[in-house]
Image (cartoon, rainbow, N blue to C red):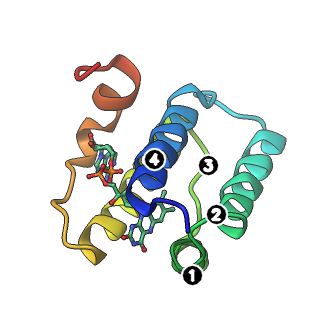
Amino acid sequence: PPDVEQLGKSSWTLLHSVAATYPETPTSKQQADMKQFILLFGNFYPCWFCGKDFQEYIEANEVQTATQDDLGKWLCIAHNAVNKKIGKAEFDCNLWKQRWKDGWEK
Ligand code: FAD
């Protein structure tokens, strides 16, 4: 099976980076496409039990795509749900943009 830790770190980097470059004011098509992207990402995620839980999380907590900040915060909260599940420290979601857009730990 794929390395769940390495896969996860790379995947979160991709997802948070996508949020950081998502438009500030997306069109309704961009919003619908982003919801599909996140859903399908979970559907094809190579760690199957991770993807299954992620899809269940999405069903219970609708992906927020109205603005870049909405998407970034939603992803941060979703990531925190995984952190909690596997016993990792929670991240302060007010800092998501500093971490993933403006950057501090390059
Ligand atoms: P990661 O959690 O990979 O985080 C990488 C970096 O992101 C951190 O160093 C930190 O700077 C930053 N960060 C941390 N938290 C947040 C946040 N909330 N918002 C923004 N930035 C943050 N692993 C399992 O064992 N079981 C699972 O069920 C599971 N499900 C997963 C589901 C998905 C969709 C993904 C993408 C990953 C999943 N993983 C799962 C992997 C797990 O989340 C971690 O990626 C992995 O354990 C490696 O952790 P890490 O300490 O390198 O940091």
Q: Is mark 2 within 8 Å of ligand 1?
A: yes
Q: Earlier in the sequence, mark 4 or mark 3?
A: 4
Q: Is residue 27 above or below residue 54?
A: above
* Cα–Cα span, label 1 and label 2: 13 Å
Residue for point 47% across, 43% down:
10
**Alpha-carbon distance for marks 3 and 1?**
18 Å
Left or right of 89 on screen, residue 42 = right
Looking at the image, tell me whether mark 3 or mark 2 is earlier in sequence order.
2
Residue holding disc 3: 65
**The disc label shown at residue 56, or none:** 1
Disc number lying in front (4 or 3): 4
Q: Does dot 2 land on a helix, a strand or a loop?
A: loop
Residue at 31 percent across and 20 percent down: it is 103
* Marked residue nearer the N-terminal end (1 or 2): 2
- Separation (CA) of disc 3 from disc 2: 21 Å
Do labels 3 and 2 touch, CB within 8 Å? no
Q: Amino acid at mark 3?
A: Thr
